[in-house]
Image: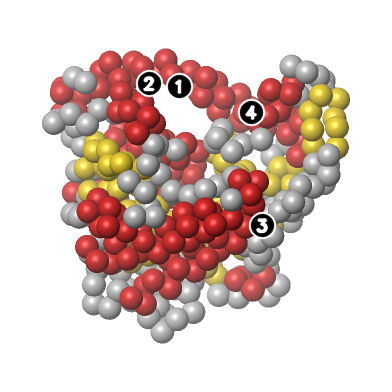
Amino acid sequence: MNTQHTDAGAWSEQTVLITGGTGSFGKKFTEFMLYEYHPKKLIVFSRDELKQHEMRQIYPDSEDSPMRYFIGDVRDVDRLRRAMNGVDVVVHTAALKQVPACEYNPIEAVLTNVVGAKNVIEAALDVGVKKVLAISTDKAVNPVNLYGATKLVAEKLFVHANAYRGTGPTGFSCVRYGNVVGSRGSVIPLFLRQRSHGKVTVTDSRMTRFWITLEQGVRFVIRSIEQMHGGEVFIPKIPSMNIMDLVKAVTPECKIEYTGIRPGEKLHEVLVSENEARHAVEVDDIFIVKPLHPWWYPNNWEEGRALPDGFRYGSDNNMQWLGVDELQALIEDGYELYSREAGTLRQRADTAHDPAVWSSMA
């Protein structure tokens, strides 16, 4: 299988659908798509009508706008087929992502994260979507919790789904990265709330995590869509941070209470395991895990450099680290932007209803 890369300038000819499009990633992805890439149509597919209503105030679905909003659940394959009719690119972000919630609601996690992935695959194959990119997580590597296990299965489904394409146009790939600064699941809001009480809770002082900003994540996804053949797992080279440096950056004057590692939590995360590294390559600032299947075209990513024996890309053995000063700057930028977002987006909402805005973006 040797799918041609998408021309970065061809987005204006593409109809794009994003599942879970009212989440943190979906809103930032929408912003970038509308203001930099100008797709022919952008469909937000999600199950929360209130969040869609709020997002519609910012990005209206007027006649002159490329925006469309579909209420639906990835558990409903028929609704997905209807929503994907005429769609060229699907970005699959919909998932249950909170580790404790998945542990407490295991069947719901499987239905959304695994069955939902299967439904996205089947619908895309049935209607002839060209490219499907699924968002994964470092917790899918050697998982120790249900969330990670469901995302591992979802990854495998998307990679192996390329075997079903036959002579059809549909290719499936994944991106995998770490914790996102400023997302709804970030630990920073917890530390900010605890700061007012003079004490923060830390599970283990040795803990490390990969770190990526929302903007970096969105740009990486767009780049991966443009470059994918179908079957890859794309992994960015991103920095690590130690939890104690984060505490110093957010709450330097607070006392620390150590609570112990929670069920399903790791000391360190891994983005490329030692086993995967044997069939992965390094291309500039990314790693690409290639599939080991007959349908994979062997010359894909032939420019990539093989990884050395025993290679493992973990948050504890990373070559890039964020210190306290860098974390402070990153947090200030991210959360100043986050705190200003409502006012900024209200201004956009005021202008977005003007048809001249959409025509100027075309």
| Residue under the image location 42 percent in, 57 percent down | 116
| Residue under the image location 66 percent in, 64 percent down | 142
- Asked whether, in this view, residue 218 is left or right of residue 140, the answer is left
Graded by Cα atoms within 10 Å as few (under 14), some (14 to 19) or many (20 or more), the crowding at tag 2 reads some
Q: CA distance from mark 2 to mark 1?
A: 6 Å
User: From where the camera sits, is residue 63 visible?
Assistant: yes
User: Which dot marks residue 145?
Assistant: 3
Q: In the rendered structure, which amino acid carries the disc numbered 2?
A: Leu
Q: In the rendered structure, which amino acid carries the disc numbered 3?
A: Asn
Q: Quick one: 99 or 252, which is closer to the camera?
A: 99
Q: CA distance from mark 2 to mark 4?
A: 21 Å
| Residue 348, quarter of picture | top left
Q: In the rendered structure, which amino acid carries the disc numbered 4?
A: Pro
Circles 2, 3 touching at the beta carbon (< 8 Å): no
Front: mark 3 or 1 = 3
Q: CA distance from mark 2 to mark 3?
A: 36 Å
Q: Which residue is mark 2?
A: 345
| Residue under the image location 32 percent in, 46 percent down | 72
Q: Which residue is mark 1?
A: 341
In the figure, 9 relative to 157: above or below?
above
